[in-house]
């Protein structure tokens, strides 16, 4: 590239932690040759809150609000993952209605999380308007959550053995109203971005994640399915009552940013389908099993995993037995592995692609740093 | 309601005071400069407000609403705030370069208006190389961006400055070639002559098929790049470069860049209106009003682009210019030349 006799040198750019598009406080040390990235080194830990250690000093029910902070875009899923693990330890049966309520909340939360991703992706590519469109629909979901549990961000709704409260009577009509218009809204999003030639050239063949690489780095969730690996815990290792619903797992095969975009858009539609089925089938009944505040599961260890919107969310709990606090809690979030694979993906791309790749992998930093 | 009469009257009054010819010329030029400057300052403030309203409505919100009717006082408040802000000069910057960059940017943006006809007879100076002068002057902005990028001693700013240099150089060429097609047909570079050659609506260059619309579209695309607006706003791509070349600027220096950006946007729209949309020509309304309507309609188009499109990447931007826009512009110029030569559609 360079003419002979001209002295050039690589330089380092410190991207983050205070950078508008690193989705929180991620920091990259980029070694660049002009605009081209030679090496990228993620630096993490700016949001470390020792969540795992905090959990070890709390009772099982008290751990739920801590898990809310693990990944605040999908707090419901985090609650669910922990509750599932704790229930598995003690062999608790969750009432039917609670299971349905959980599924409704989880899928609504998945939509809300994907809407944030949709907004930030378009924002990172310079289109500001779709961001507000995404947040407009998210607002409706947050209203539903607020109606149910009084919170809009950290819900603390799913408890060990069930859920905290029953839904109010106006929830189901409101939810139906939202679902009825939601498909048309997703069509709107697609009209703004999917067919947009600029959006396509910015995303096609950028940051290609091969299936082998994805598996080697344990990438999971939509980013894995965009690489052509059909693996979704809702189907492959069904938890809760996901085996009762009829839905598809979208898969694409190129593994580039554009495919990761398509996957998430398709997933929003599928999640809406699940919610629709769940609110039709939901039975009457109890919303929580009888669980003591000082829930003491027997000795043992358990790992439970669920399909979070950013990949596999796993909770490992070790119980000492006859104790109300867990001995050890280990959390696994999808973003960590996706951040790990980023340096491989950005190599040889331009600085603008770092932002596009990061947005398409949908990394969220609290999940990386715990 | 032509306002040329007012100026004529003032000029006559000035002559009647018995001053020497030189002084009359100097005073009238100063007055003209002040009027143009005042107009542009108000226009820039208006455009900032308008941009916020347009973006708001595109994004299904209102934009500023609290300050006055639909928030019209908002930008005035913003301007006052920026005036009051402390003017920070980081210790590592190259002081003279850092200091002069916003001033050059600001001046370059305003000087272009010397040869833009605001209406019939409303032109500061009808140079016979009018359009050439404007293109030369607006390119001056790039020097200031480069200076800002280099002088700031910041990597993001440097990347932004380099990008804008590459971008403006790339897009200047197709833009000039597109404009040349019009100049060829008008047979003059004087802005007034160009406007007068499009007296009837079917004579507007945008309606002169087939070269007119192509030249217009090329011009609009290149002008978007020239003014650093989405989808070509890579010099200040806030998601990649945080703020690009103006990252270290604050207070009034930042305001100068900011206002210059909006003035530039109005400049390219005004040029497009003059070259392709018949300038001040139009029925019923006074000429200056037609000029404003046409220019602002084009400004609206630029805003519409900005709030709809994502941003291109820097290399894609160059590719688009050199591999697509420039060949098309040249082919279009040849077509226009042939049309002029053969007398085809030469009304």
Image (cartoon, coloured by chain):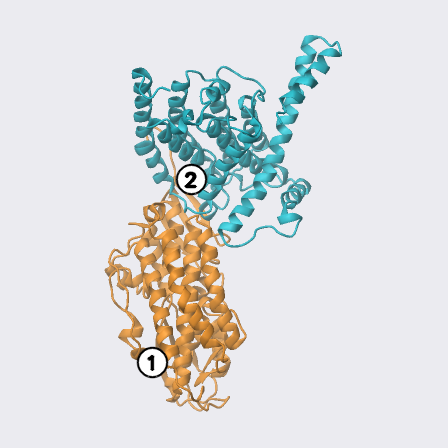
Chain colours: A orange, B cyan
Q: Specify the quadrant of the image occupied by residue B34.
A: top right
Q: Which residue is drawn at 29% across and 71% down?
A: A247
* Residue closer to the observer: A164 or B85: A164
Q: Can residue A111 be seen in this view?
A: yes
Between A74 and A19, the residue placed more toward the observer is A74
Secondary element type, mark 1 = loop
* Relative depth, front residue between A336 and A262: A262
Pointer 1 indicates a residue of which chain?
A
Give the residue drawn at x 39%, y 52%. A192
Quickly name the residue at label 2.
Answer: B232
In the image, A84 versus B38, the foreground residue is B38
Q: Give the vertical position of B156 relative to B94 (above or below).
A: below
SS for dot 2 = loop
Q: Residue farthest to the right?
A: B17
Which residue matches tag 1? A241
**Quarter containing the N terminus of chain B:** top right
Q: Is B91 on the left-hand or right-hand side of A261?
A: right
Instruction: State the image coordinates of residue B226 (x, y, percent, origin top left).
Output: 45, 33
Indicate the position of residue A283 as horizontal and vertical percent values.
39, 85
């Amino acid at each position: 590239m360079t003419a002979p006799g001209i002295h050039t040198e690589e330089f380092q750019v410190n991207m983050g932690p205070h950078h508008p598009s690193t989705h929180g406080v991620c920091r990259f040390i980029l070694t660049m040759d002009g605009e081209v990235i030679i090496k990228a080194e993620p630096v993490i830990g700016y949001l470390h809150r020792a969540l795992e250690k905090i959990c070890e000093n709390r009772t099982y029910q008290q751990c739920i609000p801590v898990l809310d902070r693990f990944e605040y875009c999908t707090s419901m899923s985090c609650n669910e993952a922990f509750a599932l693990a704790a229930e598995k330890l003690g062999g608790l049966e969750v009432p039917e209605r609670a299971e349905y309520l959980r599924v409704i909340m989880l899928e609504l939360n998945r939509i809300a999380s994907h809407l944030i991703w949709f907004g930030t992706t378009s924002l990172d590519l310079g289109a500001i308007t779709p961001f507000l469109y995404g947040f407009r629909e998210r607002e409706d979901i947050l209203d539903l959550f607020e109606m149910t549990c009084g919170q809009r961000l950290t819900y603390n709704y799913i408890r060990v053995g069930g859920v905290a409260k029953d839904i109010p009577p106006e929830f189901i009509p409101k939810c139906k109203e939202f679902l009825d218009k939601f498909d048309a809204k997703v069509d709107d999003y697609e009209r703004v971005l999917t067919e947009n030639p600029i959006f396509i050239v910015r995303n096609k063949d950028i940051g290609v994640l091969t299936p082998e690489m994805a598996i080697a780095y344990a990438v999971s969730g939509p980013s894995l399915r965009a690489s052509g690996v059909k693996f979704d815990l809702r189907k492959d290792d069904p938890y809760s009552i996901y085996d009762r619903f009829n839905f598809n797992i979208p898969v694409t095969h190129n593994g580039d940013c554009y495919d990761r975009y398509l996957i998430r858009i398709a997933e929003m539609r599928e999640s809406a389908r699940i919610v629709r089925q769940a609110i039709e089938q939901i039975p009457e009944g109890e919303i929580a099993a009888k669980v003591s505040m000082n829930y003491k599961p027997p000795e043992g260890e358990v790992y439970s995993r669920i399909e979070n919107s950013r990949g596999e969310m796993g909770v490992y709990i070790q119980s000492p037995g006859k104790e109300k606090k867990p001995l050890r809690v280990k959390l696994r979030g999808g973003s960590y592995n996706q951040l790990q694979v980023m340096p491989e993906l950005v190599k040889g791309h331009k600085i603008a692609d770092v932002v596009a790749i990061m947005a398409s992998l949908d990394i969220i930093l609290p999940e990386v740093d715990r | 309601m032509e306002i040329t009469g007012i100026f004529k009257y003032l000029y006559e009054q000035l002559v009647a005071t018995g001053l020497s010819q030189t002084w009359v010329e100097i005073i009238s030029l100063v007055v003209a400069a002040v009027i143009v400057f005042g107009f542009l300052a108000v226009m820039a403030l208006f455009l900032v407000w308008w941009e916020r309203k347009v973006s708001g409505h595109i994004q299904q919100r209102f934009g500023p609403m609290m300050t006055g009717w639909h928030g019209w006082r908002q930008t005035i408040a913003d301007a006052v705030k920026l005036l009051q802000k402390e003017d920070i000069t980081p210790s590592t910057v190259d002081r003279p370069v850092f200091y002069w960059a916003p001033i050059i940017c600001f001046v370059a943006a305003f000087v272009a208006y010397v040869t833009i006809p605001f209406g019939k007879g409303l032109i500061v100076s009808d140079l016979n190389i009018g359009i050439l002068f404007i293109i030369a002057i607006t390119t001056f902005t790039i020097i200031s961006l480069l200076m800002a990028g280099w002088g700031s001693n910041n990597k993001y700013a440097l990347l932004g400055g380099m990008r804008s240099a590459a971008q403006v150089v790339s897009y200047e060429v197709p833009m000039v070639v597109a404009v040349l097609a019009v100049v060829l047909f008008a047979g003059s570079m004087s802005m007034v002559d160009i406007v007068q050659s499009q007296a009837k609506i079917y004579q507007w260059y945008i309606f002169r098929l087939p070269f007119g619309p192509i030249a217009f579209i090329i011009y609009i695309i290149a002008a978007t790049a020239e003014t650093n607006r989405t989808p070509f706003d890579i010099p200040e791509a806030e998601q990649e470069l945080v703020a690009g070349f103006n990252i270290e600027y604050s207070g009034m220096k930042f305001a100068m860049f900011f206002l210059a950006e909006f003035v530039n946007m109005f400049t390219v729209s005004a040029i497009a209106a003059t070259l392709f949309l018949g300038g001040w020509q139009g029925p019923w309304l006074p000429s200056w009003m037609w000029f404003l309507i046409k220019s602002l309609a084009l400004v609206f188009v630029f805003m519409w682009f900005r709030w709809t499109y994502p941003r291109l990447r820097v290399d894609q931007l160059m590719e688009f210019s050199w591999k697509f826009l420039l060949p098309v512009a040249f082919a279009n110029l040849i077509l226009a030349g042939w049309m002029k030569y053969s007398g085809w559609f030469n009304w």
